[in-house]
Amino acid sequence: MTVIAADWLPYALPLRTPWLTSQGRLEERRGRLLRLHTADGLTGWGDAAPLPEFGITELAAQAFAEETAHLDLAAQQAGLPLHQWLSSEPPVDSLAVNANLGSLPEATPAMLNTASAAGFSVVKLKVGTAPVADEISQLRQLACVLPPGLKLRLDANRAWGFADASRFIAACTDLPIDGLEEPLADPESAALAKLQAGVPFPLAIDESTQLLAADFFRHPPVGRLVIKPARQGGLLACIELALRARASGLEVIVTSSLESACGLLACAQLAAAIAPDAVHGLGTAEWFAADTGQPPPMAGGRLHLPAARGLGFAPTGGIAQ
């Protein structure tokens, strides 16, 4: 397989509503698509969308895009969907995903009912954007109107000190919580293990990749690992990380970093390869007012993977020019 041409196609995609976290506010997503052409007429695609505040540097995003484009070509040449080429397992049609409702103060009973009616079993909310006491009160009020069978996946994005995290977590122990990501502003394994010991749901690390040393996997301080392929620098590195995590008894989920349709497809292909039965954080396409291509369709709370060979990305006319 010989690559005969490559180009980068920049994009700036407006969001329907601002993406709010404890780290700030995002109203537009900027990045670049990598397009590779081969001598035998194949086209491979990758997405580089840096987000430094969440550990996705320009270098990591570029590595992710370059590797994705080359793997897209390899899977196309093999005649397989990318996830099947990566895993050597039977193809996966769809993945369960959580609904993204934004920050906790924005969530309403109507939004919960809509998510439940759409087939979602888990909804994700950003916490850590308001005083802890206020958020505890808001969360407990929201839990009172939660539709049956719906769970809450919370993400603090390293908002709290140990005392506030302990207070918030203690208030959640009797609520239908699916998990809590990144509770500590200064994450440290011993402190996370102490927090995890007191709750029935998994705590998770996401952006705190500095903790992923050998000791972490020998004695995991939390119950879940969140993998963002762009931050890890590529799909193959993520597969190795997932294998180590699962061997240590950790749950593994894949989330997008609010990439365009191209990057979202890469994340979905990885999720299908490493954890097809988990509920992943991949329901982000609806946040975009415009996109680089057709995102994977959503139905019944599930993301449906393309049956095409390779990544399955088809760009919009404007991007492809």
Image (cartoon, grey):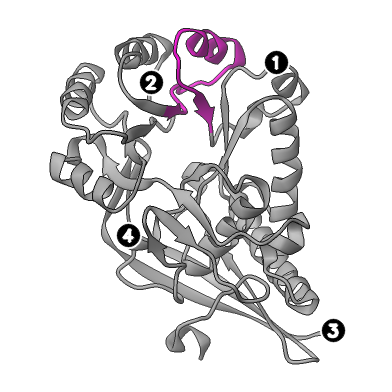
Q: Earlier in the sequence, mark 3 or mark 1?
A: 3
Residue 254 horizontal/vertical position (percent)? 55, 46
- Residue 98's place in the image compared with 262, above or below, is above
Residue indicated by mark 4: 287
- Residue range corresponding to the magenta coloring: 179-205
Distance from the alpha carbon under mark 3 to that under mark 1: 45 Å
Q: Earlier in the sequence, mark 2 or mark 1?
A: 2
Q: Earlier in the sequence, mark 4 or mark 3?
A: 3
Q: In the drawing, what numbered circle is on residue 160?
A: 2
Q: Is residue 58 left or right of residue 256?
A: right
Point 31% across, 14% down: residue: 174
Q: In the drawing, what numbered circle is on residue 73?
A: none
Please identify, in this view, whether the residue under mark 2 or under mark 4 is nearer the observer. Answer: 4
Q: Earlier in the sequence, mark 1 or mark 4?
A: 1
Circle 3 residues within 10 Å: few <14, some 14–19, many ≥20: few
Residue 99 horizontal/vertical position (percent)? 35, 48
Q: Is residue 303 left or right of residue 35?
A: left
Point 48% across, 11% down: residue: 195
Give the residue type that dot 2 points to. Answer: Trp
Q: Secondary structure at mark 4?
A: helix
Circle 1 residues within 10 Å: few <14, some 14–19, many ≥20: few
Proximity of marks 2 and 1: CB atoms separated by less than 8 Å = no
Point 39% across, 56% down: residue: 284
Residue 141 horizontal/vertical position (percent)? 15, 25
Q: Quadrant of residue 253?
A: top right
Q: How many marks?
A: 4
Q: In the drawing, what numbered circle is on residue 2?
A: 3
